[in-house]
Amino acid sequence: MKKGKQSVFFQKDIFINDAASYVGKRESEGNLRDYFQNVLKDDLMKEKSYELAETKMQKMTVEKLLEVSGKTVNDFDCIMGGDLQNQIFATSFCAREFDIPFFGLYGACSTFGEGLCAGGLFIESGNFKKIIVVTSSHFSSAERNYRFPLELGNQRTPLSQWTVTASGAVTLSDEKYKDFAPKITAITVGKVVDFGVTDANNMGAAMAPAAADTLKTHFSDLSRSPDYYDAIFTGDLGIFGHELCTHLLSNDGITMPKTFSDCGKIIFSEKQKVFMGGSGAGCSSAVFASYLFELLRKNEIKKLLLVPTGALLNKDSPLQKQSIPGIAHAVSIEV
């Protein structure tokens, strides 16, 4: 049921029965080390390039997801997913290994949210029953795609974030086949919002206005306050972006509760010296598939609003003096 211009209440049950993730060594040493069960021994994984290593990591995540689900890939109608490489290289090459329909998505670091929204709508339509949603990012492949070659040893700026080496995946289904399976109950599809930020090393500032806009719209469309949720997590605003988002919402008369946080802000510890925290298409998916999914499982939270965020630039747009638009999608998940 459409609510407002951007939100949908699902009439059908959209169950998340299974979740799986893989992370790199640095990510496994951060704040969420007790929740990451599957850790890469090295980020090259005996492949010839970091791009191929990311493909392998994503494939391993889907295989782990199938293992915990007790199902085969043929039980699913399609795979949806994306990454940060040109033409979503990692996800396309991963999908070719599974011989089922594939929807390649790109919303930068918001792609996991885009997949949950699209997958929920597909199941709501009645044409699809079971869907795999997967995203990934890799520090080394992202660095040389968006910034500088690793060999250059470029100095990082204080407001920069560390692209996580991580992949997360979930199953969406119209049936509950596990004892524990939270439901996607509503979504708010984000708009592209551009506040004129041009610093490609400050992704948090570029994405925060979009996150604030989507959150404001979500609360308005669904007639909810932030206190409706036990926890609200944006995707990868990082420390500065999270503070900016909170400030923008406050200016609009919305006071966010102490349970408002960000996946990129919490994934690393302060002593790891990653400046503003983590980022990447694998950030929100890996944190959800491990930490947040476990909190839901333990009933420590029962109502979660997940808002993956993305900065919609490519390697050329900053060189052409273009600003960096942002986007965010909100997904309401309830036990």
Image (cartoon, grey):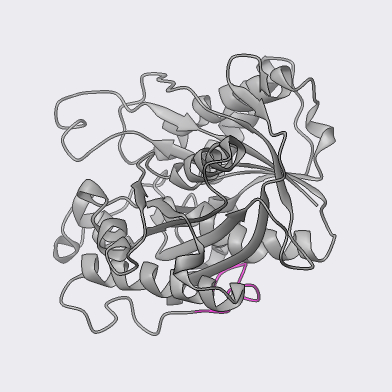
Residue at 42% x, 19% y is: 195
Q: Which residue corresponds to the image point at 29% horizontal and 23% vertical from the top-left?
A: 323
Res. 146 visible in picture: no
Q: Is residue 36 magenta?
A: yes
The percent position of residue 331, horizontal first and vertical second, equals 63, 39
Residue at (60% x, 65% y) in the render = 19
Is residue 77 inside the magenta stretch? no
Q: Position of residue 240 (x, y in %)?
A: 53, 39
Q: Which is more toward the observer, 263 or 101?
A: 101
Q: Quadrant of residue 235?
A: top right
Q: Is 172 drawn above or below residue 10 in the view shown?
A: below
Q: In this view of the protein, which residue sits in the foreground, 110 or 222?
A: 222
Query: Observer-nearest residue: 179 or 218?
Result: 179
Residue 75 in the figure: left or right of residue 151: right
Q: Which residues are magenta?
A: 29-38
Residue 295 placement (x, y as % from top left): 76, 61
Picture residue at 49% right of the left edge, 60% below the top? 76
Which quadrant of the figure has residue 92? bottom left
Residue 46 at x, y percent in the picture: 24, 84
Tell me if residue 82 comes above or below residue 44 in the rendering. above
Query: Main structural element of the magenta stretch: helix, strand or loop?
Result: loop
